[in-house]
Amino acid sequence: MPLILYTSKQLASKNLADALSAIGIEAIDTKAPTVLDVLTNFRTDSDTDYILVLSSHKSKIPKPMLTMHFPGNWNDAGMGGEPQTLNVAHAEKLKQLYLETKKANVALGLDWEVTIEADHHGPTMTENAVPIIFVEIGSSEAEWGNKLAARVLATAISGTIKKENSPKFRSFFGVGGGHYAKEFCKFMEANNDWAVGHIIPKYAIEDATDAVLMQAIEKSVDKTEKVILLKDSLNVKQREKILNFCKSYDVPAELI
């Protein structure tokens, strides 16, 4: 079972918690100043399978959207967490949450964009590490308080929790594309047995070290079976860097 955290000091976070409470699922109010601080001074117990953080999404060009991602930093830590440090991924739960959100988005008539994002920002869990997934309403205050958007995500979370004994997916490390992992979302929908774990966007590849790339292979609940590269989004230098890494550490790679 997941541990669900929020902060009543952030509009989208509280909106999501209220929607979950309405269907009988209670989240824990950390009362943190921001969603990036929800794990500060908070300790999980050994029975927690993964953590869901109820959050807002903000973008330079605001538009209605529902997003989800693993927190983690490929390079610097400008938005919290440790530099060049990833958290544990849970590809199975991320895919289930994505698919359940897509389904609820249509069923409840919201019709917003739904997408997975590449790993970014903090916090970083270094002790008793369990997977963390941020679940977000975006992308401005107008959307953060939207009750139907919160209901869609609450429905998706409930559906994901109920799939505890569903068939397992095969996990891959996604390389390339932009901040929004639309290509990997399409790949997962077309390939039912595969789920994406960590995702490094093309703009983070140049400064990524072998050590942080190896974390993307090793820090995963589901065994990372291969690296999938979006060949058309990468330049020659980026492709060679990742393919050389895969060859050096005997990790299967596939270009799509």
Image (spheres, grey):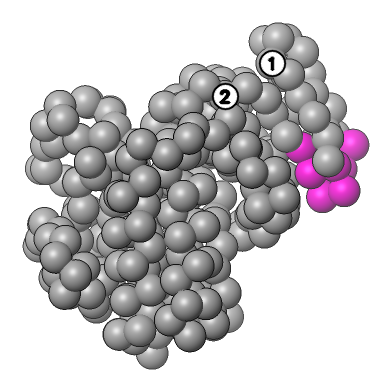
The spot of residue 13 in percent (x, y) is 25, 69
The spot of residue 92 in percent (x, y) is 47, 39
Closest to the observer, 127 or 206: 127
Q: Is residue 67 left or right of residue 37?
A: right
Q: Is residue 241 left or right of residue 20?
A: right
Up the image or down, 221 lies above or below 32; here it is above
Q: Is residue 125 left or right of residue 22?
A: right
Residue drawn at (61%, 60%) of the image: 180
Q: Which residue is mark 1?
A: 251
Is residue 215 visible from the viewing direction of this image? no
For the N terminus, the image quarter is top left
Residue drawn at (66%, 53%) of the image: 189
Q: Are there few (<14), some (14-19), or many (20+) residues within 10 Å of tag 2? A: many
Up the image or down, 77 lies above or below 4; here it is above
Is residue 194 visible from the viewing direction of this image? yes
Would you say residue 235 sits in the magenta stretch?
A: yes
Would you say residue 223 sits in the magenta stretch?
A: no
Q: Are marks 2 and 1 in contact (CB under 8 Å)?
A: yes
Secondary structure type for disc 1: loop
Return the disc, 2 or 1, that comes first in the chain's sequence.
2
User: Which of the 4 image quarters holds residue 132?
Assistant: top left
Q: Which residue is mark 2?
A: 224
Q: Give the amino acid type for the residue marked by disc 2 in the picture.
A: Thr
Secondary structure type for disc 2: strand
Provide the residue span drawn in magenta: 229-236
The spot of residue 31 in percent (x, y) is 9, 62
Distance from disc 2 to disc 1, alpha carbons, whole Å, reads 9 Å
User: Which of the 4 image quarters holds residue 195?
Assistant: top right
Up the image or down, 46 lies above or below 198; here it is above
